[in-house]
Amino acid sequence: MNIHPDHRDDLYKSGITDETIGAAGIFSVPPDKIKKALGWNAPVTSLLAFPYGNGFTRYKLFPPLINKEGRAQKYSQQKGSGLHLYLPPKFDIGADCLRITEGEKKALKGSQEGLNVSALGGIWNFG
């Protein structure tokens, strides 16, 4: 797995195991690949990538961007890429019980614990 130690620690804080990280294909984006990944020069040092399996990827920013009001933007994606549904590797689309949460890490943790859970990429990621 190509995961920066800070990114791995962030995933561990959410209770996500190495097995789940590997199954989800999560990886770190180094500084020289940020512009290509996002489509703009974000003033961050690295990205934690959450591939959706359909060609779309959402990124956690390290460090987060702080706007004029002091609000942190923690995640980003390619401009104009729209809202996508995240399905963890163990998600069963034909199951009787489906759950939806906000954020990939919550979906991964729930799936890891045996729940059939998907996620919206974030409440502000409609760009």
Image (cartoon, helix red, strand yellow):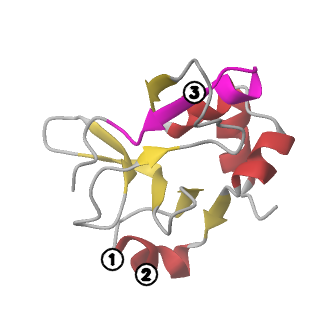
Tell me the distance, in whole angstroms, between the alpha carbons under discs 3 and 1: 30 Å
Q: Amino acid at mark 3?
A: Val
Residue 36: mark in rendering: 2
Residue 119 to residue 42: above or below: above
Disc number lying in front (3 or 1): 3
Q: What residue is at 67 percent from the left and 20 percent from the top?
A: 115
Q: Is residue 114 magenta?
A: yes
- Which residues are the magenta region? 110-122
Residue topped by disc 3: 117
Question: At numbered mark 3, what does the secondary structure look like: helix, strand or loop?
Answer: strand
Q: CA distance from mark 2 to mark 1?
A: 5 Å
Residue 45 against residue 83 in the figure, above or below:
below
Q: Are marks 2 and 1 in contact (CB under 8 Å)?
A: yes
Q: Secondary structure at mark 1?
A: loop
Give the amino acid at mark 1: Gly
In space, the residues marked 3 and 2 are separated at their CA atoms by 30 Å
Q: Locate residue 113, reporting x and y percent.
A: 75, 20
* Residue that numbered label 1 is attached to: 39
Residue at position x 21%, y 56% in the image: 127
Query: Residue 25 versus residue 92: which sits nearer the camera?
Result: 92
